Image: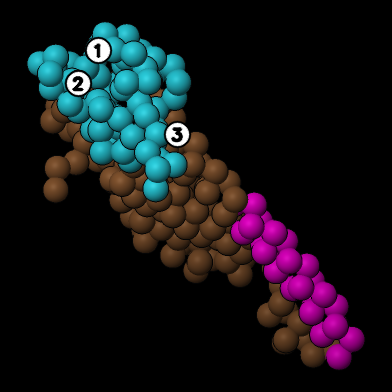
Amino acid sequence: MLLSKKEISILIEIVYSIVFALIFLPYFYENQEKNLILMDGLVEKIIQIIICTVIYFAIAYSVLEVAFKKKETRDERDDMINSKSYKLGYLLYEFSLFIFIGYVCSKFQNKELLNLTGNIELYSSFQLTDAGIIFIVLVLLAFISVIKSIYQFYLYRTV
Amino acid sequence: MILKNNLKKVRQNKGLTQEELGANVGVSRQTIISIERYRYKPTLELAMKLAEKLNIKIEKLFYFEQE
C-alpha cells in the first residue's frame, strides 16, 4: 500500500494523539481527585508535553520532507476532504460537549440529593474537581482528534 | 444520472501523464486519478480548466449517463 505525503502526515497526527493519550492522560487520571493547585508537578508535566510535542512533530515532519522531496499541490479535493473531516470533528465536539454538560449537571444534582441524606463519604465521592474536568476534556479532545484524523485518512484513500 | 468523463482516454490520446495534466491545471496527481475513477466530481472551474488544457469541449469531456 503506497501512501502519499498527505496520508502519512495524517498518520503522524493519529499516532501523536494516541501516544499523547497513553502517556499523559494517566497522569491527569491519577490526579483527578485533586484540585489543580494541589496536583504534583503540573507545571513540569505541561512543559514536558510542550517539549515532547515540538520534538515529535519536528522529527516526524523533517523525515517526511526528506522522504518526499517533491512538493505536493494542495487543491480542491484536499479542501473537500478537510471540510468533511473537520465537520465530523466539530459535530462530535458539539455532541460531547452536550454530554459533558449533562454529566456535570447530574453530578451536582446527585451531590445535592446526597447532601440531604447526610452520607458524608458518598457526598465527597461526588466532588467534581477542576483536574477532573480537565481530564474529561482532554480525553474527549484526544478521542475526537483520532476519529477526525481516521475519517480524513479514510477519505484520502477512498475519494 | 451519473456524471462520467472521458478524461483518461483524452489524456492518453494527448500523451500526457496524470502528473503532467495535474501540474497543468494546478491539482495533484491523486485528484486526476480520483476524477478518472469517478470517485471525485470536480468543480466547474477545474472541469473547465481540464477541458481547456485538453483542447476539448467540456460536454465532450464530462457527460451524464443513465443509471
Front in this rendered view, residue B26 or A136: B26
Rendered location of residue B24, percent (x, y): 25, 11
Query: Mark 1 touching mark 2, by CB under 8 A?
Result: yes
- Judging by colour alone, the chain drawn in cyan in this rendered image is B
**Which mark identifies residue B10?**
2
Cα gap from disc 2 to disc 3, whole angstroms: 26 Å
Amino acid under disc 3? Met
**Exactly how many numbered labels are in the figure?**
3
Start-end of magenta stretch: A93-117
Rendered location of residue A159, percent (x, y): 34, 42
Are tags 3 and 1 found on a single chain? no
Within 10 Å of the Cα at label 1, are there few (<14), some (14-19), or many (20+) other Cα atoms? Answer: some
Cα gap from disc 3 to disc 1, whole angstroms: 24 Å
Within 10 Å of the Cα at label 2, are there few (<14), some (14-19), or many (20+) other Cα atoms? Answer: some
Whether A104 is among the magenta residues is yes
- Judging by colour alone, the chain drawn in brown in this rendered image is A
At mark 2, the secondary structure is helix
Query: Considering only order in the chain, which callout, 2 or 1, is on the residue closer to the N terminus?
Result: 2
Q: Residue at x 78, y 67 (%)?
A: A105
- Is residue A13 visible from the viewing direction of this image? no
Amino acid under disc 1? Leu
Question: Residue A9 lies in what quarter of the image?
Answer: top left
Are tags 1 and 2 found on a single chain? yes
Whether A127 is among the magenta residues is no
Residue at mark 2: chain = B
- Main SS category, magenta section: helix
Of tags 2 and 3, the one toward the viewer is 2
Residue at mark 3: chain = A
Residue that label 1 marks: B54
Residue that label 3 marks: A80
